Image (spheres, rainbow, N blue to C red):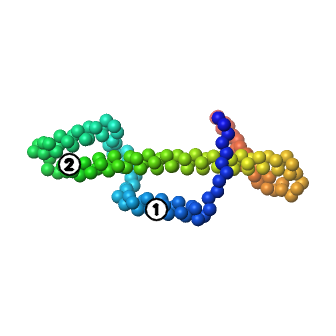
């Protein structure tokens, strides 16, 4: 894998502008809901097969409303499937953006950490008696391993 590097900055004004743009997008979707982990687990999920099943079942229900329960609102269910389908390209675009943001953050963090380790090791080797021994000692705590004492079974 070729080593990738990143050299970019974001000004506070750019960050604010991006957050404002995201808020604007959020305002365009006032119907969004949040679910708990338990609620997510309890919901039946729609996939390709169930989407086809749903469409066909709703078509059948509309054509044979005389045998359907009164509380079944086919038009509401059709609006739900239309919303499901309309959200798909938005969700894909947001997922791609999230992946790029996470990868960029990971790369920036990795590069910063690599530079910090290089600085620490250089100071450890060349920084003796330069008045930075306390800092080096404090930084060395990051690399100390806690040894587990074996428990003696009697």
**Helix, strand or loop status at disc 1:** helix
Q: Position of residue 121 (x, y in %)?
A: 79, 46
Q: CA distance from mark 1 to mark 2?
A: 33 Å
Q: Identify the residue at horizontal 87%, vertical 48% (top origin).
A: 126
- Quadrant where the N terminus sits is top right
**Residue sitting at the far right:** 129
Q: Identify the residue at horizontal 62%, vertical 62% (top origin).
A: 11
Q: Identify the residue at horizontal 66%, vertical 37% (top origin).
A: 2
In the picture provided, is 105 more to the left or to the right than 89?
right
> Residue 77, which numbered label?
none
Q: Position of residue 143 (x, y in %)?
A: 73, 46
Q: Mark 1 or mark 2, which has the lower sequence index?
A: 1
Q: Are marks 1 and 2 in contact (CB under 8 Å)?
A: no
Q: Report crowding for label 1: few under 14, some 14 to 19, many 20 or more residues within 10 A (C-alpha).
A: few
In the picture provided, is 107 more to the left or to the right than 131?
left
Pointer 2 residue: 74
Q: Identify the residue at horizontal 79%, vertical 56% (top origin).
A: 135
Pointer 1 residue: 23
């Amino acid at each position: 894998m070729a080593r990738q590097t990143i050299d970019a900055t974001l000004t506070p004004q750019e960050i604010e502008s991006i957050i404002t743009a995201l808020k604007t997008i959020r305002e365009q979707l006032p119907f969004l809901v949040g679910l708990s982990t338990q609620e997510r687990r309890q919901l039946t999920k729609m996939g390709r097969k169930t989407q086809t099943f749903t469409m066909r079942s709703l078509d059948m229900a509309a054509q044979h409303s005389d045998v359907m329960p009164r509380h079944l609102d086919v038009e509401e269910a059709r609006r739900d499937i239309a919303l499901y389908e309309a959200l798909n390209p938005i969700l894909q675009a947001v997922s791609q953006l999230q992946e790029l943001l996470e990868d960029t953050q990971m790369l920036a963090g990795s590069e910063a950490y690599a530079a910090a380790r290089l600085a620490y090791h250089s100071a450890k080797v060349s920084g003796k008696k330069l008045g930075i021994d306390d800092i080096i000692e404090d930084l060395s705590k990051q690399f100390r391993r806690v040894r587990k004492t074996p428990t003696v079974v009697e």
